[in-house]
Image (spheres, grey):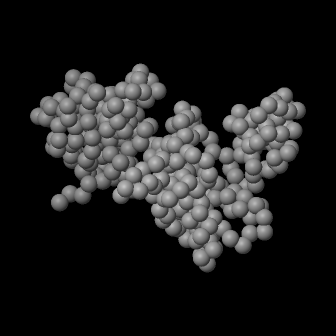
């Protein structure tokens, strides 16, 4: 049985016969020849279908298996293409409600159209890239903390009360009693530090009943938490955090570099993150921005953005404590 390869592996098989399988991303019929863009988990590849062959009727998002020969073609994606010898239609698709091959920003689709057809819009490469970067962040978060002697824990998400005070909790019925969805694993982390593990972390969901349409708060989100004992001051935690951020940025640059390039995203090199005290931050806001209102408690989001702008301008850093 011929073994399937991925589209990203084609450059290693130039001149060889290969088998591909995936989704029809796009078709361009030029009369004498038809170009099919195939999509799989490795990316996209161009497949050439000669017009004099008896190919099945194909539509975008149909699933196919293709046998063919890899040849060099500088104008094609990855510098090579596949000249098809055999094409098998595994599953025909109806005309999709969205054109998956068009960039999301240029598609003209409304947000409600994208979300109401999520099973299809998820197939857009730029949407899938979000999940690829997210997976790299999670992998590195776990790997780095394990390398620093942390143990991963799994904490309850149905709890008796809120962990951070306030009323921003979701109430659920639990066999005739009242329970809540966990806001944070904070109490459990502290218990596990005191148990003797000393250093623990969790990747888990958190739930907060905060009505917000901003990017800052979500009713459900993946929370990345660590807790460590035997520290001298907050500086120990900040040094650990700095190393963690540096490791995540480096891993995303290395393993998701093409995604960053396509999106024109630059991640800074992280060594030392500059620090500004809370008192100094308030003075900067008053002196640099003339902002004195709303500074009696925590900094609001506008103030945080201003401090970020100041740090970039005065300290040459995209990050600041």
- Is 31 left or right of 56, judged from the image as shown? right
Q: How many marks?
A: 0
Task: Residue lying at the far front in this picture: please name it.
Answer: 176
Residue at image point 55% right, 59% down: 185
Depth check: give the residue in front, 29 or 21.
21
Quadrant hosting residue 290 = top right
Q: Nearer the viewer, residue 280 or 143?
A: 280
Q: Position of residue 151 (x, y in %)?
A: 55, 71
Is residue 7 rendered to the left or right of residue 85? Answer: right
123, 278: nearer the viewer: 278
13 relative to 181 in the view: left or right: left
User: Farthest residue in the left direction?
Assistant: 54
Residue 86 percent location from the top left of the image:
17, 44
Residue 111 x/y as whole percent: 42, 27
For the N terminus, the image quarter is bottom left
Q: Quadrant of residue 314?
A: top right
Tell me which corner region of the image, top left, top right, bottom left or bottom right, holds residue 124: top left
Taking the spot 26% from the left edge, 36% from the top edge, the residue there is 61
Task: Look at the image and tell me whether residue 198 can be seen.
Answer: yes
In the image: residue 210, left or right of residue 118: right
Residue 315 sits above or below residue 121 on the image: below
Q: Residue at x 74, y 43 (%)?
A: 298
The residue drawn where x is 39% and y is 23% is 109
| Residue 141 visible in the picture | no
Residue 210 % position (x, y): 55, 40
């Amino acid at each position: 049985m011929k073994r399937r390869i991925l589209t990203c592996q084609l450059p290693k098989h130039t001149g060889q016969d290969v088998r591909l399988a995936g989704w029809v991303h796009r078709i361009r019929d030029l009369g004498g020849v038809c170009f099919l863009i195939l999509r799989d988990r490795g990316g996209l590849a161009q497949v050439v279908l000669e017009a004099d062959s008896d190919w099945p009727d194909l539509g975008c998002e149909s699933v196919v298996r293709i046998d063919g020969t890899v040849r060099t073609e500088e104008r094609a994606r990855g510098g090579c293409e596949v000249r098809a010898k055999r094409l098998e239609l595994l599953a025909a698709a109806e005309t999709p409600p969205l054109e998956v091959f068009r960039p999301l920003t240029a598609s003209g689709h409304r947000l409600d159209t994208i979300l109401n057809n999520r099973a299809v819009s998820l197939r857009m490469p730029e949407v899938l890239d979000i999940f690829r970067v997210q997976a790299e962040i999670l992998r590195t978060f776990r790997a780095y903390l394990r390398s620093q002697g942390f143990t991963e824990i799994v904490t309850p998400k149905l709890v008796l009360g809120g962990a951070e005070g306030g009323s921003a909790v979701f109430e659920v019925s639990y066999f005739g009693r009242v329970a809540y969805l966990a806001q944070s694993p904070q109490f459990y982390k502290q218990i596990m530090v005191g148990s003797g593990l000393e250093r623990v972390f969790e990747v888990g969901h958190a739930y907060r009943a905060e009505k917000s349409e901003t990017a800052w708060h979500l009713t459900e989100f993946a929370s990345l938490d660590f807790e460590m004992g035997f520290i001298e001051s907050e500086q120990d935690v900040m040094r650990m955090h700095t190393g963690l951020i540096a490791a995540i940025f480096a891993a995303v640059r290395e393993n998701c570099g093409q995604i960053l390039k396509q999106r024109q995203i630059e991640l800074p090199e992280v060594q030392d993150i500059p620090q500004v005290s809370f008192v100094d931050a308030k003075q900067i806001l008053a002196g640099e921005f003339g902002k004195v209102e709303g500074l009696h408690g925590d900094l609001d989001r506008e103030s945080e953005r201003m401090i970020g702008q100041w740090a970039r301008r005065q300290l040459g850093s995209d990050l600041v404590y």
